[in-house]
Image (cartoon, rainbow, N blue to C red):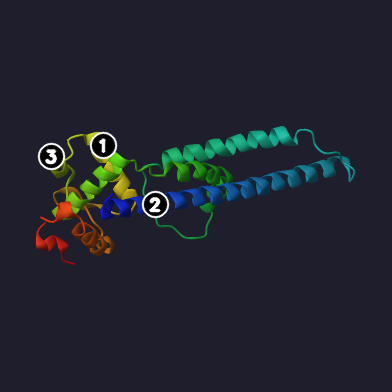
Amino acid sequence: MNSLEQALARSAADHNRQCWLGALSSLFLAWLAWLCAYALIYGAALLVETVRKGENAPFPAWLHPAFGIIALLILLGAFLARWRRRFRPLRDRPVIGWHLLPEVLLLPASLTYAIADHLSARVSLRRRTRVESARLLALIHSMKRAPLTGLGAEFPNVRALRRYLGILQILGWIDLHKGEEGFFYRVPSNREDLLNELIGARDEMADYPEDDHSA
C-alpha cells in the first residue's frame, strides 16, 4: 500500500467514524423526539379525560393505539417530504417562521430516517477499490480538469468509474464543477499540496511532469 492509498484509507476510516457518530447521535435525538411527542400526546389525552371524567380519570385505553397511528402518519409524512425534495436544492428563507412548523412536526421521523442516512453513507475501501480510486485520483490531479468522458480511456467500466468518483467525492478528494463545456472533476485547492506530496512519494508517479508537483 503506497502513501496515496494509505491517505485514502485514513480518509475512509475517519469518514466512517463520523458516520457512526452521526447515526448514534441521530438515534439518541430520535429517541428524545419520540419521547417528547409521546409526552405531548399523553398530556393532551390526560387533559381531555380529566375534563370529561374529573380528576380521578383512568388512563385512557385508546392512547397507545392512537399514538401508534400518529407515529405512522408522521413517518409517512416525513417519507413523502423526503421524496418530494430529493432533487431540490436548499432554498434561502427566514430562519424563524411558520414554514418551520411542518419540519418540527416531522422531526421525530426525520431523525429516525437520519440514522439510515448516516449508515448508508459509509464507504467500503477493499483492496481493488482502494487501488483503483488512488489511480483515478492521480489521473484527475494530472488532468487538472477531468471531464467524465476524458476518464473513460483509463476506466472503460463506466459503473465502476462512477463508484470510484462517488467515493473520492464523498471523502472530499475531488469536486464536481460546471464549466462552459460541461461538467468536470478537479482536486479542491485545500487538497492540492497534500496530494502533490503523496504523488511525489510514489515511485510509479516519478515520470509526472514537474508542473504537476508544484504548489
Residue type at mark 2: give it. Leu
Q: Circles 1 and 3: CB distance less than 8 Å?
A: no
For the residue pair 154 and 117, the one nearer the viewer reads as 154
For the residue pair 134 and 78, the one nearer the viewer reads as 134
Residue type at mark 1: give it. Ala
Task: Kindly identify which numbered label has been placed on residue 160.
Answer: 1
Residue 21 in the image: x percent, y percent? Answer: 51, 52
35 horizontally vs 175: left or right: right
Q: Of label 1 and label 3, which has the lower sequence position?
A: 3
* Pointer 3 residue: 153
Q: Circles 2 and 3: CB distance less than 8 Å?
A: no
Distance from disc 2 to disc 3, alpha carbons, whole Å, reads 36 Å
* Pointer 2 residue: 90
Task: Note whether residue 174 is visible.
Answer: no
Distance from disc 1 to disc 2, alpha carbons, whole Å, reads 30 Å
Q: Determine the residue positioned at 74% across, 36% down.
A: 63
